[in-house]
Image (cartoon, rainbow, N blue to C red):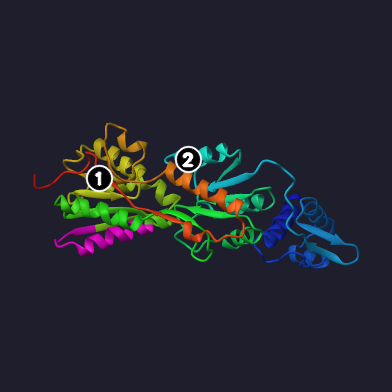
Amino acid sequence: MEKKYQTVTDTIQRWITSGQYHENDKLPTESELMAQFDVSRHTVRKALGDLESDGYVYRVQGGGTYVAERRLKPVSTMQSVAVMATHINDYIFPAIISGIERVLSAQSVSLMLSSTENSEELEAKNLSKLMNSAIDGLIVEPTRSAFTVKNEAMYAQLAQSHVPIVTMNARFKDLQVPYFVMDDFEGGKMATEYVLQHHHTHIMGIFKTDDQQGVDRMNGYVYALQKANQPTVATTFLYQSGKSENNMGDRLRKLFAQTDRPTAMICYNDKIAVLAYNIAQTMGIQVPEQLSIIGFDNSSLASSYGLHLTSVNHPKANMGRDAAELILRMIQNPTKDFLSDSKTYTPELVIGESVVDLKQ
């Protein structure tokens, strides 16, 4: 019974948070729910009772069950901003979050952190919790942003409830909210032009295609190759979060074992660039003499493992600071449209020692 009860509870909650049922809409009757879920009346009543306790529904004696209005925030002198990112504990994300935290703490605003791990299901669960929490604003990195945002209706419902929203690293296609993003197309173009200027004609690009950043970087890479006034042999190596990302090492080993391997690689980020560097080293391939590598983000990894990586800079803490400053302004001015305050950061190629000129 426990499993069936949880299924009923979770499904009705999802109906509400996704916007399938709106405030004061009548839900199906107990008999209809019993038939739909093939459960007993006791199970349905237990699920509805818990949903009522959690503020999702209210019941009218003899009149059925209805969607409750979004609960009012408790009276509090402390404002709270939620930050939801694909990751929070590694790579460049601690720096971004540090930039946010410094701004919020200076204004005595509390910070609520959550991670989606680039999972749409976990994103939905986190959003459901936030919709019933006393948050004053949301800074979010959309999950799997290269695709139609699966949970955009939940974001829209938050916005309709007058919760200000700002996005980082990607923007919503349909929901008009302010965003802070890199010009990743220009970054991909810039990195590719750099290896072309260093006389590389056999080039590979490695890009993550379920995040908008990766797609834009790939498009910049392709554009630069198409505009090059020199013959090139160019390939792309595409992957997504999950299994193909976990198999990256094996794929790189197979690539490096080929006699016609590329002389230069443009990598989606510094993590991939460092992985490629370490695998090349174990296979006796010298960087940059035999393999030039460019990364993205200019993270702390760019100067690790004895490598001084050439990398496209990411604003990191500055992006976090800018997003936090804007969300506070949005909270203070709830009727103003702040879309024009969005910011696209101009990329900068930080020159290291991982690219060689083949004509020198």
Residue matched to label 2: 99
Is label 2 in a helix, a strand or a loop? helix
Q: Quick check: 175 above or below 130? A: below
Taking the magenta stretch, the answer to whether it contains residue 336 is no
Amino acid type at image mark 1: Ile
Give the Cα distance between marks 2 and 1.
29 Å
> Which residue is farthest left?
360
The residue drawn where x is 16% and y is 52% is: 197
Residue 73 falls left or right of residue 175? right
Kind of element beneath mark 1: strand
Please tell me whether residue 318 is drawn above or below residue 19 in the rendered image: above
Tell me the amino acid under the disc marked 2.
Gly
Residues drawn in magenta? 215-234
Q: Residues within 10 Å of mark 2 (few under 14, many from 20)?
A: many
Q: Nearer the viewer, residue 158 or 283?
A: 158
Label for residue 219?
none
Residue 41 in the image: x percent, y percent? 84, 60
Coordinates of residue 191 in the picture (x, y in percent)? 26, 51
**Horizontal placement of 177 versus 262: left or right?**
right
For residue 293, which numbered disc appears in the image?
Answer: 1
Residue located 34% across and 56% down the image: 217
- Dot 2 or dot 1, earlier in sequence: 2
Residue 117 makes an appearance in the image: no
Q: Would you call the spot at circle 1 few (<14 residues within 10 Å), some (14-19), or many (20 or more)?
A: many
Residue, x 32% and y 33% (percent of image)? Answer: 304
Query: Residue 169: x percent and y percent?
Result: 44, 52
- Label 2 with label 1: CB-CB less than 8 Å: no
Asked if residue 140 shows in the view, the reply is yes
Residue drawn 69% across and 59% down? 11
Extreme-top residue of the structure: 306
Q: Pinpoint residue 223: horizontal percent, then vertical percent.
A: 27, 63
